[in-house]
């Protein structure tokens, strides 16, 4: 029935399809879907595309369309100002048709001549990797007009953070995506509080981010703002606050992708997907989750986990069925990571020396997952030292 409806739509869209073929005679162009149902897919890939266009203005133009579901309306507004976008009601049926039959491939972005590294990072026809290193070369594309700046500054003044240094922190939860099964990427916000308090003791203010969150932080501190559960939360402020923060402490979520838009340093805790490393030019430090064999009661090495492709399993229940358990980072581990991260961003220890000590781990990431650590991301040194046997 679904296909039947698409064909009916295509019948009425025949004039536009013919128009595309006519234009194509004189001007090469492509059609692509802007993945908009999740903020991560909506953010970084498009920022990469825009920066690549800055590098190469002659790059083949793309006509985009949003999905029906929009993760962030403010970001939709921004991209609509910078890209050539047509309504999804028109382009989606045409795009489905063009993807189904090879005769229409001339209208789709072609990655066949790209490297295996790029091909691995294609999702729904969109590239999710900065293979040309354009993000660190160009300034952020997102721009705020006068009214938006006033609105953002008004909120910062309201919460007592105007003209003060602050960072944002977030935990991925099932609430945002209305998940039935608990994802291995999720975590408890409470386990970040000791680390947050450490950073606050160093002179920062803190803002807890998140969308559709109902669990409040269970204490009161004037230096820590629970924005996620406040009535002030908005798609605009979700972007604006990250644009103004010093850095982000987060699980691997859409917020880390939003941080990419503004090239913000990132401490990623409860990391379970090191295969996404090459998507984040400023993911400076990670703290991975551990995996325990339920039959032996022992933790398994990261090399064994990557050999078995465990980093591609999505739910806790799947792990339990296989006889394993995923262990979330503890309060203490996250606190030590924030201490090391503070030292890192203040240049208080040697990055290259730390990378050399962790060389074996990053070699395994490249060997089993295929991602190179080209942005010099490190494991929290304290975590690496205390779990040395898991990295060998």
Image (cartoon, grey):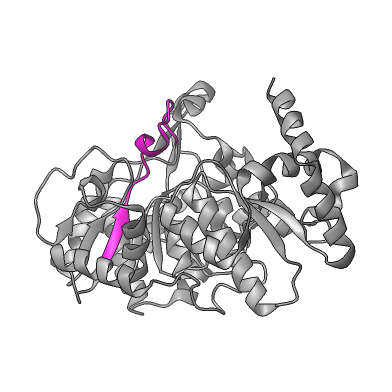
Q: Pick the quarter of the image with the N terminus.
A: top right
Q: Is residue 65 magenta?
A: no
Number of callouts = 0
Residue displayed at 44% across by 70% down: 262
Seen from the viewer's position, the closer of residues 204 and 322 is 204
331 with respect to 267 (left or right): left
Q: Is residue 91 above or below residue 372?
A: above
Q: Is residue 173 magenta?
A: yes
Q: Position of residue 323 (x, y in %)?
A: 50, 24
Residue displayed at 53% across by 53% down: 42
Residue displayed at 35% across by 35% down: 175
Q: Position of residue 182 (x, y in %)?
A: 41, 30
Q: Is residue 366 visible?
A: yes
Seen from the viewer's position, the closer of residues 283 and 140 is 140
250 with respect to 22 (left or right): left
208 with respect to 82 (left or right): left
Q: Position of residue 20 (x, y in %)?
A: 81, 54
33 with respect to 211 (left or right): right
User: What span is in magenta?
Assistant: 166-183
Q: Is residue 380 visible?
A: no
Q: Position of residue 297 (x, y in %)?
A: 42, 29
Q: Is residue 176 above or below residue 39?
A: above
Seen from the viewer's position, the closer of residues 105 and 87 is 87
Q: Is residue 160 above or below residue 388?
A: below
Q: Is residue 139 above or below residue 45?
A: below
């Amino acid at each position: 029935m679904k296909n039947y409806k698409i064909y009916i739509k295509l019948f009425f869209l025949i004039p536009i399809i013919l128009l595309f073929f006519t234009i194509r005679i004189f001007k090469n162009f492509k059609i692509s879907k802007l993945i908009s149902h999740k903020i991560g897919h909506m953010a970084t890939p498009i920022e990469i595309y825009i920066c690549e266009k800055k590098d190469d203005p002659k790059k083949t133009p793309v006509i985009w369309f949003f999905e029906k579901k929009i993760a962030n309306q403010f970001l939709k507004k921004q991209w609509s100002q910078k890209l050539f976008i047509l309504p999804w009601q028109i382009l989606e049926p045409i795009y489905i048709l063009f993807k189904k039959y090879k005769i229409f491939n001339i209208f789709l972005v072609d990655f066949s001549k790209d490297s295996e590294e790029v091909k691995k990072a294609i999702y729904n026809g969109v590239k999710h990797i900065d293979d040309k290193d354009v993000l660190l070369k160009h300034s952020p594309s997102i721009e705020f007009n006068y009214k938006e700046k006033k609105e953002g500054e008004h909120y910062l003044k309201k919460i007592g953070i105007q003209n003060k240094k602050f960072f944002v922190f977030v935990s991925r939860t099932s609430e945002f995506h209305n998940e039935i099964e608990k994802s291995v990427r999720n975590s408890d916000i409470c386990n970040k509080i000791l680390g947050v308090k450490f950073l606050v003791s160093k002179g920062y203010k803190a803002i807890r981010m998140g969308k559709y969150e109902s669990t409040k932080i269970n204490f009161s501190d004037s230096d820590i703002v629970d924005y996620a559960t406040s009535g002030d939360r908005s798609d605009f402020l979700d972007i604006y606050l990250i644009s103004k923060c010093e850095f982000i402490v987060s699980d691997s979520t859409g917020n880390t992708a939003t941080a990419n838009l503004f090239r913000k340093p990132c401490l990623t805790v409860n990391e379970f997907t090191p295969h996404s490393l090459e998507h984040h030019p400023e993911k400076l430090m990670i703290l991975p989750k551990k995996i325990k064999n339920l039959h032996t009661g022992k933790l398994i090495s990261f090399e064994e986990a990557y050999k078995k492709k465990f980093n591609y399993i999505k739910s806790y229940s799947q792990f339990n069925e296989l006889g394993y358990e995923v262990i979330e980072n503890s309060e203490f581990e996250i606190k030590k990571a924030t201490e090391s991260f503070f030292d890192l961003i203040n240049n208080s220890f040697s990055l290259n020396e730390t990378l050399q000590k962790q060389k074996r781990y990053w070699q395994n990431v490249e060997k089993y997952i295929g991602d190179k650590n080209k942005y010099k991301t490190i494991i929290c040194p304290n975590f690496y030292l205390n779990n040395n046997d898991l990295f060998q």
